[in-house]
Amino acid sequence: MQAPLKIKCPQCGQPSENIKRTNIFSMFFLIVVARWQMRTINMCDECTRQEILKNGAINILTSNILFPFIILPTSIYQYVRSHEKGHSKGVVEDIMTSIKAQQITPEFANQLDKIRHL
């Protein structure tokens, strides 16, 4: 059995078998004014969970009455998904795209195919 492909986390720099791509939502709401922002992060599972918790804590204040209806359920869903094993599908697709033109070893290509088909 081959060892899973480890990728360096862009946040902490540690090699990980669980790099996640997650959309982080931020909201600012003041009854008559609302602002919604989404950003995509690529981080290891631990960094992803920290970012989700940090963002959720900030949004308690900024999204006020909408927090339990929008931000909290989204954050819970993202937190649970961050515990899934393996790299996110989008991360694997990015790797495949970036190395398509390069010559790779059959073993490396085999590992990527296994990850992509999970």
Image (cartoon, rainbow, N blue to C red):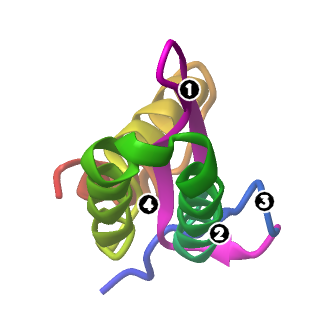
Q: CA distance from mark 3 to mark 4?
A: 27 Å
Out of 42 and 97, give the one closest to the viewer: 42
Q: Residue at x 50, y 67 (%)?
A: 5
- Nearer-N-terminus badge (3/1): 3
Residue 17 part of the magenta segment:
yes
- Nearer-N-terminus badge (2/4): 2
- Nearer-N-terminus badge (4/1): 1
Main SS type for the magenta part? strand
- Nearer-N-terminus badge (2/3): 3
Label 1 residue SS = strand
Q: CA distance from mark 3 to mark 1?
A: 32 Å
Label 3 residue SS = loop
How many residues crowd mark 2 within 10 Å: few (<14), some (14–19), many (20+)? some
Indicate the quadrant containing the C terminus: top left, top right, bottom left or bottom right: bottom left
Please give the residue where the numbered disc 3 appears in the rendered image: 11
Give the mark toward the camera: 3 or 4. 3
Label 2 residue SS = helix
What is the quadrant of residue 15 in the picture? bottom right
How far from the left and from the top, in percent, is residue 96? 46, 33
- Nearer-N-terminus badge (3/4): 3
Q: Which mark is residue 30?
A: 1
